[in-house]
Image (spheres, helix red, strand yellow):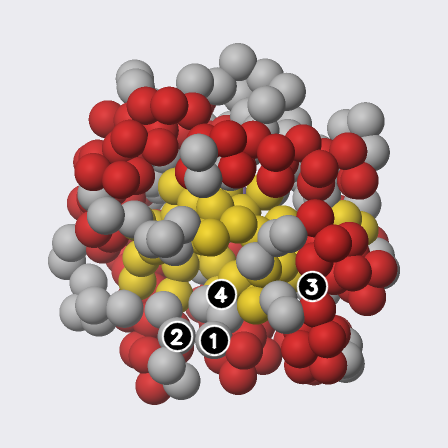
Amino acid sequence: MIKSAVTISIVEEARKGPFVFHDDVAAACEKAAALGFDAVELFAPSAEAINAQPLEELLRKHNLSLAAVGTGAGMVKHGLHLCDADASRRVKGCDFIRGIIEAGAPFGAPAIIGSMQGKWDATTDKETALGYLRDSLNALGEHAKSLGVALIYEPLNRYETNLATTMKEGVALLAPLSTDNVVLLADLFHMNIEEANIADGLRDGGKHIGHVHFVDSNRQAAGRGHMDYAPIAQALADIGYDGYCCAEAFPVPDSDETARQTIETFKAVFRS
Ligand code: LER
Ligand code: MN
């Protein structure tokens, strides 16, 4: 059965980012549980910041799971990414992600590689960049496997990456990997920009899809834009998806209303 989740960011630099709750993890967990969410997804500045949270206690108290942990702070705080022309910076990027993998694993939460994937550019051509990214996905994917969690790779829209922007390109990126432990994140906001048809894109991702960012066309709560969720739910059923649909959305008009609207739409789409 598909499960619901909602994002919490404790990254100061991402204060204006597409995260439902900000700053106060305890208050966000309480609200998520009261609304009936199954899980939360945490975007933190570092592995240490995850370890410093009383997460085990909060999750147990509110009967929540940790759906995933984001790694984008490596980019927004430190400018690190996996396609950097400088090998020592790529190592630092990998180390940052490895720390987040290790912080999430005790909770069964996989790490997400989104903006940390980077881009190809004038100094690093596309094939070289894809090679760097695959090398990191292989190493980090096997490390995650040794800790019992998957590693999530997220295709992004063209303004955020030029490596893989569609589910089809995501599948092609994974195909030559030596690890079998990397899954795709289908973010409906990015897919609305890049896919000719979102439901077909989900079918392209098929069995590789391991996580979904559940959001509307305008990156607000599901139900506040013009996304057509019926064919999306049908495609997810067709591919046998039973992971999380996690709200990664701007808190418009505010966090509480974004969470409330998300769970209302989630229930209408997946529980009716
Ligand atoms: C970025 O646009 C995004 O969708 C995040 O999930 C990745 O860091
Ligand atoms: Mn996303």
Residue at the outermost front position: 272
Dots 2, 4 in contact, CB < 8 A: yes
Query: What type is the residue that disc 1 sits on?
Result: Gly
What is the distance, in whole Å, between disc 3 and disc 1 at their CAs?
Answer: 16 Å
Residue position for label 3:
44
How would you rate the neighbour count of disc 4 (Cα within 10 Å): few for under 14, some for 14-19, many for 20 or more?
many
Dots 1, 2 in contact, CB < 8 A: yes
Query: What type is the residue that disc 3 sits on?
Result: Ala
Rendered residue at 63%/70% (across/down): 63
Rendered residue at 80%/40% (across/down): 256
What is the distance, in whole Å, between disc 1 and disc 2 at their CAs?
Answer: 6 Å
Q: Counting residues from the N terminus, which is met first, the one under dot 3 or under dot 2?
A: 3
On the rendered structure, is 15 left or right of 150? right
Q: Nearer the viewer, residue 205 or 131?
A: 205
Q: Counting residues from the N terminus, which is met first, the one under dot 1 or under dot 2?
A: 1
Residue position for label 4:
111
Q: Counting residues from the N terminus, which is met first, the one under dot 2 or under dot 4?
A: 4
- Determine whether the beta carbon of the residue marked 1 sits less than 8 angstroms from the nearest atom of ligand 1: no
Residue 206 horizontal/vertical position (percent): 21, 44
Query: What type is the residue that disc 4 sits on?
Result: Ala
Residue position for label 1:
108
